[in-house]
Image (spheres, helix red, strand yellow):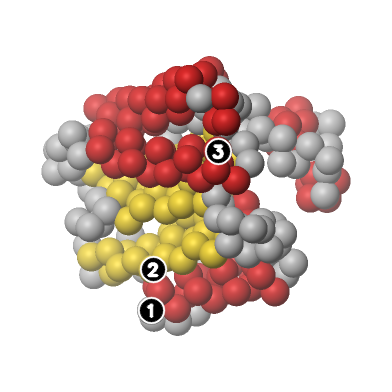
Amino acid sequence: MKLRVGHLSIVGKRENNEDACYVDPQQRFFLVADGMGGQSAGERASGLAMEIVPQKLQLMDFQRAAGDQAVKVIDDSVSQANYEIMALGELDSKLKNMGTTIAFLVQSAGTMFAGGVGDSRVYLLRKGKLEQLTTDHSLTQALLDAGTLTAEEALNHRYKNVLYRYLGCKEGGQGTNPTQVQPQVGDRFLLCSDGVTGGADDTTLARLLAEGSDPQAVAEAIVQAATDGGSKDNITGVVVFVEA
């Protein structure tokens, strides 16, 4: 199968862009990060994640690594980034408490591994149905899972952007538990920061992912829709098409 990809990251209504993304030149993996901790700290954290995780993932045998073997390489990569972000935060007072989310899509031995830490997301559009492949590590999602919030209440809940897991805290390196997907021709994946989901709902994302034949144009349309929808954050999207 052939993959085609488009990506875009914009500052949006913030003063600087703490988001970052990475597209492997050989299209074996794709990453999105959303930094936190204020300006230089957030940029440094997301930048570190986009530097360290690709370096570690390069060690994977993408032709043969499957199942638990592939998950171990992914988890080790994310754990290393988590450790280095925490360590740098301890060494430099200006970077104290910095952190970042990460979302990933890794193709190995014919399987797609989708996961992340924090609230950046990976979606799959298959045969017109949009499915979120990741789970937000936010307090609101935890309350939703516990049944103490409804989906409608969760949309604008005060703890929506409060994370209990991210890279830069001790829980950040405790494994990613990725969803494993056998890709099909026609599948379309979206990796995005919460700047996208803060301005575009699932119905909009499904419609835009389904439209067009150019993944770059689709990525740009999704970012524009989030902007038009009132997103107040940096906005980053990576779109991956699976073709014959």
- On the image, the x and y values in percent for residue 146 come to 76, 28
Question: Quarter of the image containing the C terminus?
Answer: bottom left
Is residue 72 or residue 187 the one in the foreground?
Answer: 72
The residue lying toward the viewer, choosing from 42 and 117, is: 42
Counting the numbered discs, the total is 3
Q: Nearer the viewer, mark 1 or mark 2?
A: 2
Whether residue 133 appears in this view of the structure is: no
The residue to which callout 1 is attached is 214
Q: Are marks 1 and 2 in contact (CB under 8 Å)?
A: yes
User: Could you say where residue 3 lies in the image, as x and y percent from the top left?
Assistant: 28, 64
Res 73 visible: yes
* Image coordinates for residue 141, horizontal then vertical, percent: 70, 36
Name the amino acid, label 1. Asp
176 versus 241 height, above or below: above
Residue 41 has which mark? 3
**Residue found at x 72% / y 59%:** 232
Q: Is residue 17 shown left or right of residue 156?
A: left
